[in-house]
Image (spheres, rainbow, N blue to C red):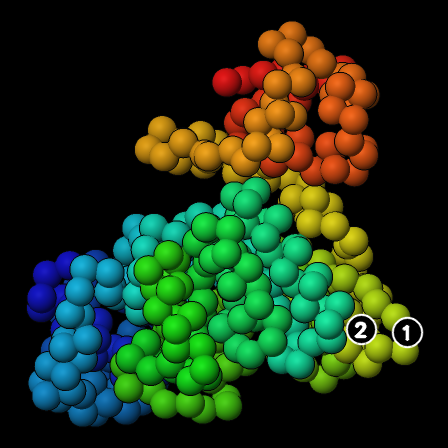
């Protein structure tokens, strides 16, 4: 992006202007810079609200110069809705953000993502479930996306990082700030191994109203949203509702009827969310196994997967010809649940292929 265009988009980051109206303006043949040249009357004729001209002129060069200082490294980007790097799924929602600030790998924005959200004060079981689901989904090739809040969000991010996989954190402040402060080290790790994302202008402080707004991005970029634990009144249920309105899949883990943090999950299950007990159910339900496998094929060309010893052993029990699951279980001596899980991950990483009657070695 040229410097002049970048300055224009940075100016727009400070102004409340809808992405859809902005796109209509650009699709009419205008350049982004012409928005700043039109009179108030002309802007209103294009469907913009009264007062836009004054707002555009209020963003001074000093403000933009200060914003530009943030772009001090190659891993910091501004991704407008017109960019190829803008997440395709997010563009489909009713109210997409006009731009995204990204610190980290912006190519992850268009990787298949699964949102994981839940309570800021999860139970011990909720913590374990979050960690287990996030690790399995991340290892299977899905990018775990959440909001970097305390509790479930942070646990999900850390679980993905712990298995060496990228994760995306969508935050409710400018990217020049970290909230909550105790997640500063996590934010650094995410920016190096994944991506931090925000639609808010640089310098935007903590504001409670911004967090429900950013939730539409978390679920909007994702194929599906998993709610681990949530009270009846919680931000997680806002995210689940938004996901449903966006036509995305919503999953929920059930719990005890005596657990107040299970009531939110039970509520959205009654509203149509899918009850899940394992991460594999989410993968199968999304029907994206083939796509995730393709992505791993492409990644394997650059960096081959290093299989742990037990996976290497299971792989030896799969022949070039069709080998039934029962045969693999018999040869390995392991429990059926363990073998099924390992075969799934081997298939997702293109080491084996599922065929009628069992599995075959691919490489």
Name the residue beneath numbered marker 2. Answer: 262
Image-based side of 274 in relation to 354, left or right: right
Q: Quadrant of the N terminus?
A: bottom left
Q: CA distance from mark 2 to mark 1?
A: 7 Å
Q: Is residue 121 above or below residue 297?
A: below
Mark found first going from the N terminus, 2 or 1? 1
Q: Residue at x 71, y 14 (%)?
A: 323
Q: At which x and y percent is residue 80?
A: 29, 63
Q: Residue at x 55, y 45 (%)?
A: 139
Q: At which x and y percent is residue 360?
A: 63, 15
Q: For residue 284, which quarter of the picture?
A: top right
- Residue 181's label in the rendered image is none
Name the residue beneath numbered marker 1. Answer: 257
Please report contact status of discs 2 and 1: CB closer than 8 Å, yes or no: yes
Instruction: Tell me if mark 1 has few (under 14), some (14-19) or many (20+) residues whose alpha carbon lies within 10 angstroms of its own.
Output: few
Kindly state the secondary structure of the residue where label 1 is placed.
loop
Q: Is residue 294 above or below residue 49?
A: above
In front: 34, or 279?
Answer: 279
Q: For residue 62, which quarter of the picture?
A: bottom left
Kindly state the secondary structure of the residue where label 2 is placed.
helix
Q: Is residue 314 above or below residue 268?
A: above
Q: At which x and y percent is residue 318?
A: 65, 17
């Amino acid at each position: 992006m040229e410097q002049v265009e970048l300055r224009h988009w940075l100016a727009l980051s400070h102004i409340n202007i809808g992405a859809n109206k902005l796109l209509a303006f650009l699709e009419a043949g205008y350049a982004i810079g012409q928005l700043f040249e039109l009179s108030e009357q002309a802007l209103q004729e294009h469907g913009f609200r009264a007062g836009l001209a004054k707002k555009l002129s209020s963003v001074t060069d000093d403000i933009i110069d200060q914003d530009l200082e943030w772009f001090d490294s190659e891993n910091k980007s501004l991704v407008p809705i017109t960019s190829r790097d803008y997440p395709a799924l997010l563009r489909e929602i009713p109210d997409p953000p006009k731009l995204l600030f990204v610190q980290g790998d912006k190519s992850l924005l268009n990787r298949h993502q699964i949102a994981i959200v839940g309570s800021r004060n999860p139970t011990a079981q909720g913590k374990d479930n979050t960690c287990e689901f996030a690790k399995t989904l991340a290892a299977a090739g899905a990018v775990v996306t959440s909001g970097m809040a305390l509790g479930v969000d942070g646990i999900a991010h850390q679980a993905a990082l712990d298995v060496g996989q990228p994760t995306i954190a969508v935050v409710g402040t400018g990217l020049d700030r970290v909230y909550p402060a105790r997640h500063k080290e996590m934010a650094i790790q995410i920016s190096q191994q994944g991506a931090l994302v925000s639609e808010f202008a640089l310098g935007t402080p903590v504001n409670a109203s911004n967090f429900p707004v950013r939730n539409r991005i978390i679920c909007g970029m994702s194929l599906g949203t998993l709610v681990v634990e949530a009270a009846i009144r919680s931000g997680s249920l806002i995210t689940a509702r938004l996901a449903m309105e966006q036509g995305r899949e919503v999953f929920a883990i059930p719990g005890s009827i005596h657990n107040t943090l299970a009531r939110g999950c039970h509520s959205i299950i009654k509203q149509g969310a899918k009850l899940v007990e394992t991460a594999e159910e989410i993968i199968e339900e999304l029907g994206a196994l083939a796509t995730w496998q393709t992505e791993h094929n492409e990644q394997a060309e650059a960096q081959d997967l290093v299989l742990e010893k037990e996976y290497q052993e299971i792989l030896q029990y799969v022949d070039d010809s069709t080998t039934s699951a029962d045969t693999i279980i018999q040869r390995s001596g392991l429990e059926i649940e363990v073998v099924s899980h390992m075969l799934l991950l081997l298939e997702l990483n293109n080491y084996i292929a599922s065929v009628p009657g069992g599995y075959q070695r691919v490489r």
